[in-house]
Amino acid sequence: MRNVYGWLLLTPAAILLVGFTHYPAFATLFDSFFSTGTVVRPTRFVGLANYAALGDDPIFWQVLRNNLYFAAATIPTSIAIALLMAIWVNDRLPARALVRMSYFTPTILPMVAVANLWLFFYTPQIGLLDKFTALFGVASHNWLGDPSTVMGCLALMTVWKEAGFFMIFYLAALQSLSPELEEAAKVEGASRWYYFRRVTFPLLMPTTLFVLVNATINSFKLVDHLFILTKGGPDNASNLLLYYIYQVAFSFFDTAYASALTVVLLALLAGLAIVQFQLVEKRVHYR
């Protein structure tokens, strides 16, 4: 009877998990082996044809390179800034609650609102960034319309939004550490840097692993910001993998090819997660 009661408690969560996670994933994998059906031409089995088309799709490879560059630029930067902010607000400083709230505020803003806010920064001539650079005699620049600067602008906006979210996890982990460790280190004459490098940071590795996996997933699911700011332009210079899937499915109406792209995205994220767990797990010290 106790087992039945336990399964009944798990049933609502299991239904949601299967209905909104497992079933869509398997349905997407199934659809990737078929062609996109129309009124005139029904769906038919094409095997690996959709995946073979990826190799001949130059936009896919460009988007994949963009996403890898975007991930490399945002993941370590946002994690490092989050850790620094957590250490800063964990100390005794004036108006500590206000500082914490200021760091966390970008996280609770809607993505569309964040995109419109940063659009006010990047707009040529009237944007705050051009107003600032004009003070030094620099000519106006189309930051989002230049392929050499658009990805950097998106990465800066993403770090600004996500660092405060990751800071909360690091702050909670720092507050869970025993103060006796720091006191013992001071008695031994250890410097603050040595204590952080040899004691604090190793004990934060479980949190770092969690934050790393989440930051990786977030770097591959950016859609809202691109829709407002660039729509993947100019010439796909800012297009990312998930936004390209959105374009293929809802602009080009090729749902089968979009399913193949989605499977590739899921496989890529799974592979990155496995690598992260294999590399970082060895350095994790659970208490």
Image (tube, rainbow, N blue to C red):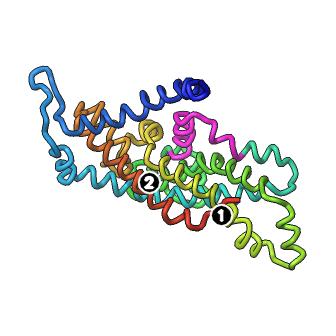
Give the percent coordinates (x, y) of residue 199: 74, 69
Give the percent coordinates (x, y) of residue 39: 13, 20
Q: Specify the quadrant that holds the N terminus.
A: top right
Label 2: few (<14), some or many (≥20) within 10 Å?
many
**For the magenta stretch, what is the residue range?**
103-122
Would residue 134 be visible to someone looking at this image? Answer: no
Q: Residue furthest bottom?
A: 189
Horizontal side of 195 relative to 19 (left or right) equals: right
Q: Main secondary structure of the magenta part?
A: helix
Helix or strand or loop: what does disc 2 sit on?
A: helix
- Residue highlighted by disc 1: 285
Horizontal side of 110 relative to 19 (left or right) equals: right
Decide: is 75 above or below 244.
below
Q: Is residue 112 magenta?
A: yes
Horizontal side of 158 relative to 148 (left or right) equals: right
Residue in the picture at 48% in, 48% down: 217
Q: Nearer the viewer, residue 154 or 54?
A: 54
Helix or strand or loop: what does disc 1 sit on?
A: loop
Quarter assignment of residue 49: top left
Q: Nearer the viewer, residue 184 or 50?
A: 184
Decide: is 19 above or below 185.
above
Horizontal side of 91 relative to 12 (left or right) equals: right
Residue in the picture at 22% in, 34% down: 254
Decide: is 227 above or below 233.
above
Kind of residue at disc 1: His
- Residue highlighted by disc 2: 151
Q: Residue furthest left?
A: 40
Would residue 88 be visible to someone looking at this image? Answer: yes
Q: Specify the quadrant that holds the C terminus.
A: bottom right
Kind of residue at disc 2: Met
Q: Is residue 89 magenta?
A: no
